[in-house]
Amino acid sequence: MKTLIVYVHPSHRDSRVNQALLDAVRPLPGVTVHSLYHRYPDGFIDTAHEQALLAEHQLIVLQHPLYWFSCPALLKEWLDSVLTRGWAYGHGGNALSGKYLLQAISAGGTDDSYRAGGHNGFALTELLRPFEMTAHLCGLHYLAPFVTHGSRVIEPQALAEQALAYHDHLKALFADPTAQRLDSRESAR
Amino acid sequence: MSLLNSPDFFQQATIYLGATVLMVPLTKKFGLGSVLGYLIAGMAIGPWGLGLIGQVEEVLHFSEFGVVLMMFLIGLELEPRRLWQLRGTIFGLGGLQVGLTMAAVWALARWAGWPNEVAVVAGMGVAMSSTAIVMQTLNERQLSNSAPGHAAFAILLLQDLAVIPLLMGLALLAPMAGGGFDPLAAARAIGAIVAIGLFGKFLLRPLLRMIAGTGLRELFIAFSLLLVVGVAQLMLSVGLSMALGAFLAGVLLADSEYRHELELDIEPFKGLLLGLFFIAVGMSVNLALVLRDPLTVLALAALALLLKTVLLFPLGRLFKLSTPHALPFALLLSQVGEFAFVLFAEANRLGLLDATRAAQFKAAVVLSMVATPLLLMLYEHRLMPLLVRQAPERPADVIDEQHPVIIAGFGRFGQVVMRLFHGIGQPATIVEHDPNQIDMVRRFGWKAYYGDASRIDILEAAGAARACLLVLALDDPDTVLKIAREVRQRYPELAIVARAHGRSDAADLLELGVEVVRETFGSALIAAELALKRLGHEPYTARRLVWRFRQHDEALLAESLKHRHDRDRLISLMYRGRRDLENLLGAELKRPDEPSEPDWH
């Protein structure tokens, strides 16, 4: 399946987790890696270019670290600029309809901290509701997020395993994306 | 009969203007500057050439006012404070030049068996250089503000000051003229200068303000001309140099608020009259005399040029000019100036110089003037490359450190790059070929190596084989292209970021696969952004428009590479580009800043 990894990290060179993850999936057939902070250091998004890229791909992966319980600023700017009315939503806006959206997120907190009463107060799927809703409005199938927890302390061994898991996860999606649809199932992990 | 009714006037104007329009572009095309074009045009139409124009002396006198206007303009550029700073150079360098040249010519002439008076007159004449030729040449080459330009100017100024004592001395020499030092005349001269100073300080500005207040541009122009003519007239009446008076008046107005208006108004008059002046000089060459005894005239001219150059070069070095500066400086001032005409005529009148010799001297002077642009071109095309290559007194520095980055060129451009690098602790090896620049930046604690970056062995010494990046920050586009080409071939792995002059230089470099920065493009974009904000666009919109434009322009440049040699395709591409840009920027202006779905609010 033609897959676009929209990679959003302002300091790629310092992120050992996202580097490992990205390197693991880059060689997969049909995968295009598109790094927003490399392409748009000024923060201005070329809407036409981005829309053409999205149109070409069936699976869209937003790979980014979790910043303040959300995405890095440039990804928000990207959403604001690219998902235009009449293209992504609204009257005649069905360019993305039927495609799949996956978030691949690295988070500093542990799995356990993301729950009611935990250190981070909410489940991650709750915090990611705005993304889910965005996908929904654009007719995208929102898949269960692929999360790497404890990204600041993860051991090399565990990181290697996680990268492999990411690789396998995408391969499984290519085979049957519907299996991971969050909008048709209750929860992911 | 009025001047305009005379058919003669139109005929002459046609001849002057026609000859100018014909010759000047030709000499400019060959890199010889406009002066030679005027001189040749003059020789061609003058009484000794085609004989189209007769009254040379009158034209010469009239057009000398062009030199006066030029000195006024020079004065306007020079505030009293800066003039004061130049005083050491004016009196030191200028005094030495005039004194030594006179002494040397005198000694040589005496040795050749000339009478004492003739030797003295020749010395005085040869000591002078041509303000008109030198300043015009400096302006054309945009060197007025360079170190050799300042030194040359200082000498010219002192020569103008020396005119008065020299003419007085001439009178002393003449046995029958009862001249000599006249205290009354000296007092009058000083009085005139003081009067100009007081007038300039207290009366001139209110007067200018009043005239500018009328809003009549012609009146202002008329007043500007009246000012210069009046001052020149006053100076003439007390026996001082008109040019010197105009210069003084200019200096007094240098810091006034009307400086630019005065410059704008006087400039075209100066340009035309100065051109006429050069034509008149060309016309006054007695070609018949030159042809009758060509060797004498040529020898005199050559000797004067050689002697002046030989004296000026060490003086330039003494006053801290580097060799590649001191040599053109010496050549630039090596001709004998127009003041010699006055001097020889005066000497002839006083009986110090016979008519034949005066005519020979005069022809030699003009030949030396003609030689100036030729010598300068010879220097630029033959001598300079040798000098810069060999740089005998300063071999390329031994580069004892090699960094992953090499910056070639440490002027305004390279320095900014380096300062940023310095801020993040990124070391770089800097190669610069202007020794003055190196000494200057060393005083600010930077280390730059002297060397010509267009030589591959210098880049080799700077570590090109192991470096990962070369920044070409030199200002000469041809040199940048040449280096980029050679480096691409020799070190294909070495990335290059190059400074390009304009679009076509950028295209040349892009074809080599080099990353290119058009040197004024970025600043023009910043200017556009400021202007957009001034026009009421939001800062964010302004920045986005500029970003869009830049993206579009760079894409267009990359695409135009494919059609570089197909003019029609290129033009149609440009038309399409313009249309695309309108659409792009139009869309940018209409871009909603927020999703506008009504039920989202």
Image (cartoon, coloured by chain):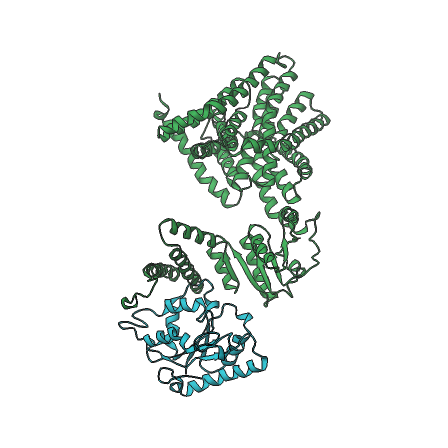
Chain colours: A cyan, B green
Is residue B80 depicted above or below B538 in this figure?
above
Q: Between A158 and B506, which is closer to the camera in this rendering?
A: A158
Q: Please count the marks in the image.
A: 0
Give the quarter of the image for residue A180.
bottom left
Q: Position of residue A184 (x, y in %)?
A: 35, 84
Lateral position of residue B252 relative to residue B452, left or right: left
Q: Position of residue B176 (x, y in %)?
A: 63, 12
Location of the C terminus of chain B by quadrant is bottom left
Q: Position of residue B341 (x, y in %)?
A: 57, 26
Q: Between B2 and B51, which is closer to the camera in this rendering?
A: B2
Location of the N terminus of chain B by quadrant is top left
Q: Between B581 and A149, which is closer to the camera in this rendering?
A: A149
Give the quarter of the image for residue B98.
top right
Residue at the spot 69% in from the left edge and 24% down from the top edge = B114
Is residue B55 depicted above or below A172 in this figure?
above
Is residue B8 depicted above or below B568 in this figure?
above
Which residue in the rendered view is the most extreme toward the right? B111
Residue B130 visible (yes or no): no
Residue B231 visible (yes or no): yes
Lateral position of residue A80 relative to residue B195, left or right: left
Is residue B305 depicted above or below A95 in this figure?
above
Lateral position of residue B101 relative to residue B15, left or right: right
Which residue in the rendered view is the most extreme toward the front? A117
Q: Position of residue B390 (x, y in %)?
A: 68, 51
Lateral position of residue B330 relative to residue A89, left or right: right
